[in-house]
Amino acid sequence: MANTAAELARRKAREEDGAGCRDNAVPFNQQSFEQLKSECLQTGSLFCDPTFPAGWDSLGYDELGRYSSKTKGVEWKRPTELCSNPQFIVDGAKRTDICQGELGDCWLLAALASLTLDTQIVNRVVPLKQSFSSQYAGIFHFQLWQYGEWVDVVVDDRLPTRDGKLLFVHSAERREFWSALLEKAYAKVNGSYEALTGGWSIEGFEDFTGGIALSYDLMKAPPSLFNIMRKALMRGSLLGCDISRSHKTEAITGLVKGHAYSITAAEKVHHFGSVVQLLRIRNPWGHLHWTGAWSINSKEWDGVKPKGKRMLDHVADDGEFWMSYSDFLDQFSHLDICNLTPDTLTKKTIKRWSYAAFEGAWRVGSTAGGCRKYPATFCSNPQFFIRLEDIDDDPHDGEDGCTVLIGLMQKDARRERRDLTIGFSIYQVPDEYKGGSGVRLGPDVLLQAQPVALTENTNLREVSKRFKLPPGEYAIIPSTFEPHRAGSFILRVFTEKHAHSRYQ
């Protein structure tokens, strides 16, 4: 109980002073950007980050380790050593600023490409007024969302290069360096560049926005998915997709298996009197695109009036392309949608989610109860309660109810190179327990009644899912698969209408 009380006190203190909120980021590693920059300017020195040095450990531990062939010839250089007039950002942050290098982090770059579609969001992650001329001290900073709070991450501008060129992400404009420096900041919070190899775009989406992401297996796509995608884009959500299966070769389709893409638009077009659902998709490589129907210069565009072509901006040379929704389902494997928190959305025309977040922990001997397969300990897991009162307006699927997005995220899985198998169950609260302060559901409910909804267990960083529930009060039970597995987590709940929530 002492640990729980301390956690609650810490959370309350943080909420009161606003530390970690969107407008008051916490210095990562307790490094103050302004203080470090001022010290460098006073001494006339360029910043060298002792917490993420220009050395082997920052590159990686295996494939990018000290003795790997992939790191031979690597030199750490500052942009001022790579070109005569380096720029932080040239004409704003654009999707063409994100070209993949030799690191397998296309999942991250696809998320970053989607990020650039909203200037206000990208300016939150990439603070303005940073340059290589005015008060240059070799130090830059970025702001990332990490497990429930925003952190301000400081980096020096020494970047991995080979033969005078950036080894990892770079801009098509060779004198521009914001994307390379942001990738370095992301590598820093995760322990190394190699820690970014392999992943899902939802991680990047969430860490750049603080939003909650949902994944869809496109072989099991719900009938309303196109409407969900269109509604999500209108709400300012970020969308990404990937291909893990392919029936045809890349030479035929132009699509790359095992690669991540971002979705930038979902529209309907009139084609010879019929309505066709189209998606605009971007390859973060900046080249290689779909060669089938509705691709650049394909015959399908002949059936669209010039005004429609202009509205869709159907010709692109930066890796963007259009394809039909039906071809999308046939060619792609997974879809990720990142729904943004209310404080991230600033446009008045965008409808916002109602949002609540809770921190918690599974502690051996007290709250690490495991899943329902372990009835002797399951009831000891943390319990979170929500009360849904109002049904959705204009439901996307035509069914009345309350839409709820729930995400359970384990902390520091990528940095520590370990993962737990996690999941959660949702139980309807019996009438006799509704609204009770300090009430916890016991075996009479959790072991006798069936959950109204639950997730599959996963060893990914987060398990999240969309639910449609009738109005009522519900208990959310997060757990590891096996009992007696310690770990900390954050539970987040998004609802279309306001919902009352509490933690027991």
Image: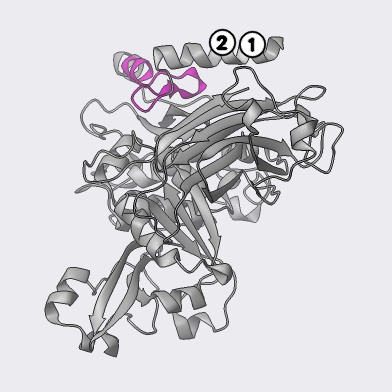
138 lies left or right of 250:
left
Q: Indicate the colouring scheme.
A: one colour
**Amino acid bearing label 2:** Ala
450 lies left or right of 152:
right
From which residue to which does the magenta span run? 21-38
Residue 455 locus on image (x, y percent): 66, 49
Point out the residue furthest to the left here. Answer: 307
Quarter of the figure with the N terminus: top right
Answer with the quarter of the image where residue 304 lies.
Answer: bottom left
Q: Are marks 1 and 2 in contact (CB under 8 Å)?
A: yes
Residue position for label 1:
5
Residue 155 magenta-highlighted: no
Query: Element at badge 2?
Result: helix
Say the numbered circle drawn on residue 9. Answer: 2
Residue 91 locus on image (x, y percent): 19, 49
Point out the residue furthest to the front here. Answer: 432
> Of 116 and 270, which appears nearest the observer?
270
Whether residue 386 is visible = yes
Residue 22 magenta-highlighted: yes
Query: Is residue 346 shown above or below 194?
Result: above
Spatial distance from mark 1 to mark 2, Cα to Cα?
6 Å
